[in-house]
Image (cartoon, rainbow, N blue to C red):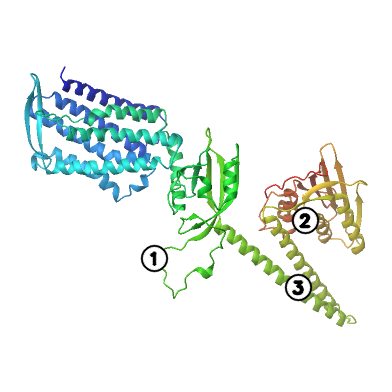
């Protein structure tokens, strides 16, 4: 057999493999039909099959009309391949965002335009100026084509675009590792082989014979490589594609560090974070030399779960480089005023604070670092904290002044017979006491809001007994009954837990509808369940539904509740590891019970649950 015969067999085989792989992918793999990877792959498979089979038939044709007809079909396949390859390659490289609405019609439209010019060549002769038949051997007739200016322009365009696409694809392999890198390397090889074959076909011409275009011949190897990427490296699986897109298009910087402490991959957001260059290939201790806590966390990576470390970097317009030292946060004083120029030649780097989440990459020794920018959140929290403290300080001072003047007024009108004046003073005194209570409750709420409240050990028996004795002395009209154990009942709770006991007893007395309210306080420890129950019964009108929902924690909103007290009772108890319950009492009144875990030993102190 002649060499042309072998080429024809390879072309037919390559086209068959391409169409078989396409059918396999569409029917058996879990792919998203609208994704750019699949759109590009379908275009490549259809174009390569059309190109290969049409070229094989052209090589077998013996008349000029047949050769021209198959040549037109060949150009249609060439145009489809030229339009689909950049879409497919950029999508695999994670650079599909580069194909904007303006670039895509140019990159993919020009090859299709050349194919239209080739099909209509007889009207303008831009692609090739002449087609003649040449006898090769005894039984082979070949077409000898004289290229036109359009054909030369097509070659220049194709090799330029393909070279740029392959460069972007090769460059993307440096930013990733593992299965993603293997996937991109296979696709890089699949695109590189036809390109090299095309160069060989043009530069290495057999003397005395029309050249054979080896570009479609290499589609057999290209299709096989693509099949490996699809089956072994899950090239077009919807889950794998989604993972790549999520990481590459994630706004949070993501860095992957290998077991030897070298940065192996980053996403685009992380690349923008390092203005002094791509960190891939650099040691983690060199890149974050001013963040020893972060470096140490990477070295002691958790085998399961995640670890969070706070890091600070210099950043300009979302980018940045590792920051030398701590520095200060940008303030309003740093921003230009209305009279200043707002267009600087270079943006000023600002320190940004990140919460870095570290975790192990599945089935590897690598560590994944996800940077979440919390600069604005921390700044807002600091502003709120300062504002709360200032407001509480000023409010407490004003209330003290008002209370002092009320005391003077009470002395001035002590001999007055006006019941209205005395009643007005009593109302004002109760209001100032209530305002002071709100200030103290706001301070408690701020203590709980910082996320790391202090824990202490308490003898709950002593806490409850002292509060009850205080009620007997200060409010003798209250009919108070107590049932407390003789032994100490030790709990480990939030440092402000005694305020729960104060609030429960105070609320029961304050909202009573009797001049001599009845109150029963009971404390029972159960070693069998390692819990203790504080039970407070009153004979009042009961707790409204909205307030009860806040007290037991079924409604976290304070919109319809009466003040912070009930919310604080539930919040402090919950953070301390306990629960709050409220039920109606037979004959009227309410029973509020607080259940807490007992402290196991003197040296045991449980960690604070996350609020």
Residue sitting nearer the eye, 134 or 582: 134
Q: Which residue is mark 1?
A: 345
Q: Position of residue 328 (x, y in %)?
A: 56, 63
Occupied quadrant, residue 223: top left
- The residue shown at (38%, 36%) is 184
- The residue shown at (74%, 51%) is 570
Mark 2 to mark 1 CA distance (whole Å): 54 Å
Q: Is residue 607 left or right of residue 175?
A: right
Q: Which residue is mark 2?
A: 496
User: Label 1: how many residues lie within 10 Å, few (<14), some (14-19) or many (20+)?
Assistant: few
Q: Which residue is mark 3?
A: 399
Give the secondary structure at mark 2: loop
Of the image marks 1 and 3, the number of the one nearer the N terminus = 1
Q: Is residue 144 left or right of residue 329?
A: left
User: Label 3: how many residues lie within 10 Å, few (<14), some (14-19) or many (20+)?
Assistant: some
Q: How many marks?
A: 3
Location of residue 314 with respect to 414 vertically, above or below: above
* Front label number (2 vs 1): 1
């Amino acid at each position: 057999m002649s060499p042309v015969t072998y080429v024809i067999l390879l072309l037919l085989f390559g086209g068959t493999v391409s169409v078989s792989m396409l059918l396999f992918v569409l029917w058996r793999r879990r792919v998203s039909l609208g994704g750019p990877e699949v759109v590009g792959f379908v275009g490549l498979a259809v174009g390569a099959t059309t190109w290969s089979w049409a070229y094989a038939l052209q090589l077998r044709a013996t008349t000029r009309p047949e050769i021209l007809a198959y040549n037109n079909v060949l150009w249609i396949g060439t145009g489809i391949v030229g339009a689909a390859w950049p879409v497919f390659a950029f999508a695999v490289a994670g650079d599909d965002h580069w194909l904007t609405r303006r670039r895509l019609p140019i990159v993919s439209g020009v090859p299709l335009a050349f194919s239209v010019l080739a099909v209509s060549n007889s009207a303008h002769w831009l692609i090739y100026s002449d087609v003649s038949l040449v006898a090769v051997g005894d039984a082979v007739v070949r077409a000898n084509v004289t290229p036109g200016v359009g054909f030369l322009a097509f070659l220049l365009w194709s090799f330029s675009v393909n070279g740029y696409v392959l460069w972007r694809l090769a460059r993307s392999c440096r930013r990733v590792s593992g299965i993603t890198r293997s996937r991109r390397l296979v696709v890089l090889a699949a695109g590189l082989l036809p390109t090299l074959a095309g160069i060989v076909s043009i530069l290495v011409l057999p003397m005395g014979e029309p050249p054979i275009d080896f570009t479609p011949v290499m589609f057999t190897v290209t299709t096989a490589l693509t099949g490996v990427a699809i089956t072994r490296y899950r090239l077009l699986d919807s889950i794998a594609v989604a993972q790549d897109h999520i990481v590459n298009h994630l706004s949070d910087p993501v860095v992957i560090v290998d077991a030897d402490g070298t940065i192996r991959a980053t996403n685009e957001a992380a690349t923008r974070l390092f203005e002094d260059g791509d960190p891939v290939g650099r040691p983690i201790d060199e890149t974050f030399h001013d963040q020893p806590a972060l470096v140490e966390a990477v070295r002691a990576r958790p085998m399961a779960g995640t670890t969070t470390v706070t890091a600070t970097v210099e950043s300009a317009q979302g980018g940045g480089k590792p920051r030398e030292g701590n520095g200060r946060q940008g303030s309003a004083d740093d921003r230009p005023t209305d009279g200043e120029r707002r267009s600087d030649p270079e943006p000023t780097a600002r320190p940004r604070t990140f919460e870095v989440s570290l975790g192990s990459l599945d089935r590897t020794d690598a560590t994944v670092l996800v940077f979440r920018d919390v600069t604005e959140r921390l700044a807002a929290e600091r502003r709120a904290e300062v504002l709360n403290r200032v407001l509480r300080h000023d409010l407490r001072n004003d209330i003290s002044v008002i209370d002092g003047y009320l005391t003077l007024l009470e002395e001035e009108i002590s001999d007055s017979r006006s019941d209205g004046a005395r009643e007005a003073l009593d109302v004002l005194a109760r209001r100032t006491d209530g305002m002071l209570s709100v200030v103290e409750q706001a301070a408690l709420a701020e203590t709980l809001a910082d996320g790391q409240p202090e824990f202490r050990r308490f003898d709950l028996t002593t806490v409850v007994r002292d509060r009850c004795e205080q009620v007997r002395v200060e409010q003798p009209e209250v009919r108070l009954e107590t049932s407390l154990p003789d032994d100490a009942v030790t709990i480990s709770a939030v440092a402000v837990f005694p305020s729960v006991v104060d609030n429960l007893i105070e609320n029961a007395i304050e909202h009573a509808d009797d001049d001599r309210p009845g109150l029963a306080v009971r404390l029972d420890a159960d070693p069998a369940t390692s819990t203790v129950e504080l039970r407070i019964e009153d004979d009042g009108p009961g707790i409204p539904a909205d307030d009860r929902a806040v007290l037991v924690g079924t409604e976290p909103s304070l919109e319809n509740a009466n003040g912070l007290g009930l919310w604080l009772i539930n919040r402090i108890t919950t953070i301390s590891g306990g629960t709050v319950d409220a039920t109606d009492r037979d004959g009227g009144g309410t029973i509020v019970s607080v259940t807490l875990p007992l402290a196991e030993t003197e040296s045991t102190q449980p960690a604070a649950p996350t609020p």
